[in-house]
């Protein structure tokens, strides 16, 4: 069941979290310290985590939480996170808000099919990310970004954030967002290396339509 309360770490840290699972074809899994969050998680450090998820099913994989529609504030993550798709240093998918979070974990997405969606903070973002940063190395197939792999939706906003981690992808790779179908990136910067095949950008790899906005950001 989803976490729906308030988890306040009070500045404490959790070390050496290890998750090694496989998602079978036709099934869905949510992986992280929390699987699914609809509440509030704040003021916590996760250090030296080691998460590896494989299999033919759909996995939502984050250092902190697999899927979040709630609030995440002042969380730091370090270690390694490896998965198939929807891989994020903080959250695999986030529809809520993330504020003052950071990732230094190395992230790898290896999808069996479809898009990888790997992001330093969030693999797929449908909410807001503010005052956050990534310094971890990120690699994947498609939709790979320093902050979010896919900034998806008119209400998806990344503000006041930066990436300093190196990014490698086959396509749709960006220093802030790998792909942006809509939404806003504002007051952000990237100083990490971005490399790969097609649709590679220092800020956003691929703008899908005119609903996307990039403002006051640099590399």
Image (cartoon, rainbow, N blue to C red):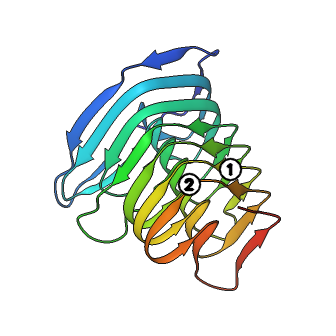
Is 148 above or below relative to 40? below
Farthest residue, direction right? 216
Disc 1/disc 2 C-alpha distance (Å)? 8 Å
What percent of the width, then of the height, locates residue 207?
61, 79
Which of these two is toward me, 88 or 41?
88
Residue at 75% from the left image edge and 63% from the top image edge: 218
Where 10 sits versus 122, above or below? above
Q: Which class describes the residues within 10 Å of circle 2: few (<14), some (14-19), or many (20+)? A: many
Q: Residue at x 52, y 62 (%)?
A: 194
216 horizontally vs 105: left or right: right
Q: Are marks 1 and 2 in contact (CB under 8 Å)?
A: yes
Up/down of 58 relative to 136, above or below = below
Q: Which residue lies under the disc numbered 2?
A: 146
- Looking at the image, residue 174 sits to the left or right of residue 1; the answer is right
Quarter-wise, where is residue 135 in the image? top right
Q: Quadrant of the N terminus?
A: top left
Residue assigned mark 1: 162
Disc assigned to residue 148: none
């Amino acid at each position: 069941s989803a976490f729906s309360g308030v988890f306040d770490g009070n500045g404490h840290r959790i070390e050496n979290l290890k998750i090694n699972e496989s998602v079978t074809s036709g099934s869905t899994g949510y992986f992280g310290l929390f699987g699914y969050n609809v509440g509030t998680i704040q003021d916590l450090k996760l250090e030296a985590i080691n998460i590896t998820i494989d299999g033919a099913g759909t996995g939502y994989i984050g250092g902190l939480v697999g899927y979040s529609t709630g609030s995440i504030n002042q969380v730091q993550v370090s270690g390694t996170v490896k998965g198939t798709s929807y891989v994020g240093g903080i959250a695999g998918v986030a529809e809520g808000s993330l504020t003052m979070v950071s990732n230094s974990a190395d992230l790898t997405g290896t999808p069996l099919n479809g898009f990888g969606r790997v992001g330093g903070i969030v693999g797929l973002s449908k909410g807001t990310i503010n005052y956050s940063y990534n310094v971890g190395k990120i690699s994947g197939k498609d939709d790979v970004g320093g902050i979010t792999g896919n900034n998806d939706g008119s209400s998806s906003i990344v503000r006041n954030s930066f990436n300093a981690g190196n990014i490698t992808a086959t396509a749709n790779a960006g220093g802030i967002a790998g792909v942006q179908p809509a939404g806003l990136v504002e007051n952000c910067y990237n100083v990490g290396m971005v490399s790969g095949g097609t649709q590679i950008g220092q800020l956003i790899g691929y703008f899908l339509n005119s609903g996307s906005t990039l403002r006051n950001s640099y590399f």
